Image (cartoon, rainbow, N blue to C red):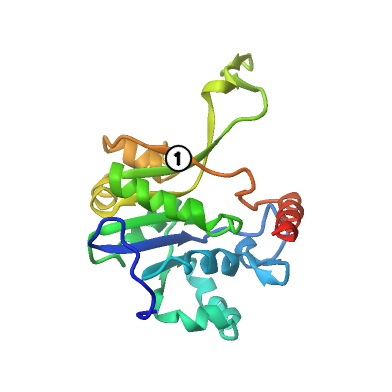
Amino acid sequence: MNKREHYSPLGAGGIYAIIVAGGSGSRMKSEIPKQFLPLNGKPILIHTVEKFLQIPAIQVIVVLPKNDIEYWYEITASNEIIQKFKDAIVITVGGASRFQSVKNGLKSIKTDGLVAVHDGVRPLINLEIIQKSYEIASEKGTAVTSVWVKDSVRQFDTNGESIALDRTKLKLVQTPQTFQVNLMKRAFEVDEQPSFTDCASVLEFAGEKITLIDGAYENIKITTPEDMLVAEAFLSQQ
């Protein structure tokens, strides 16, 4: 790991990624947690971690449920890439919510720099978007990937009535969501709120301006069997 060229858009500080992998297999109708399901012969989570390990001098923090940590070590014991860069990987225990899991991951970061938070079940993220997120976050403080809504969208009220929304003003938020470490740590000092659905909502609650960057439609979050089929199709094209 130390032989790789150092990549630091800030010029100083560390480059980190927190990979949140706390899902279950319920919506996948699987007894195996979805992040460990095989995608083209390799667990989804390993695809994801390997993608971030392409960033030189990075430290990857994988946040897992306590009961899954032993399984992680079992499935990665024979993986050449994971073993080659094992000193760059930190495994930590998740919390009861995404907010708590990310907060636990932040505790492993001891220096200033940049941190990207990414869903463990988004294995199709490309290296260019990852790099762009670090570059924009180093300049703006925040960089959140997103794509424009394709479908028509309607909003429901408490009476079951609905109204059409202007989709040209709506974007779908993805990960990675990348931030300067000092902003991230300060934002996560607040009490957890029901509105915290991702890291961007936490930073916004703390008063930070969210900078959106272009994501990719193939950067899907795998949560259902149909998503697996789509992911396999995308991988076959790569």
Assign the N terminus to one quadrant of the image. bottom left
Q: Is residue 236 above or below residue 77?
A: above
Check disc 1 and report its element: helix, strand or loop.
strand
Q: Which residue is painted at 31% across and 34% down in the image?
A: 209
**Is residue 135 visible to the viewer in this orientation of the structure?**
yes
Horizontal side of residue 160 vs 199, given as left or right: right
Residue nearer the viewer, 195 or 53: 53
Could you tell me residue 161's position as x and y percent? 63, 14
Considering every residue shown, the one lying at the far bottom of the view is: 78
Mark 1 residue type: Ile
Q: Is residue 203 above or below residue 102?
A: above
The image quarter containing residue 45 is bottom right
Q: Which residue is painted at 26% across and 34% down in the image?
A: 207
Residue nearer the viewer, 207 or 22: 207
Could you tell me residue 65's position as x and y percent? 49, 66
**Is residue 192 visible to the viewer in this orientation of the structure?**
no
The image quarter containing residue 57 is bottom left
Could you tell me residue 183's position as x and y percent? 25, 48
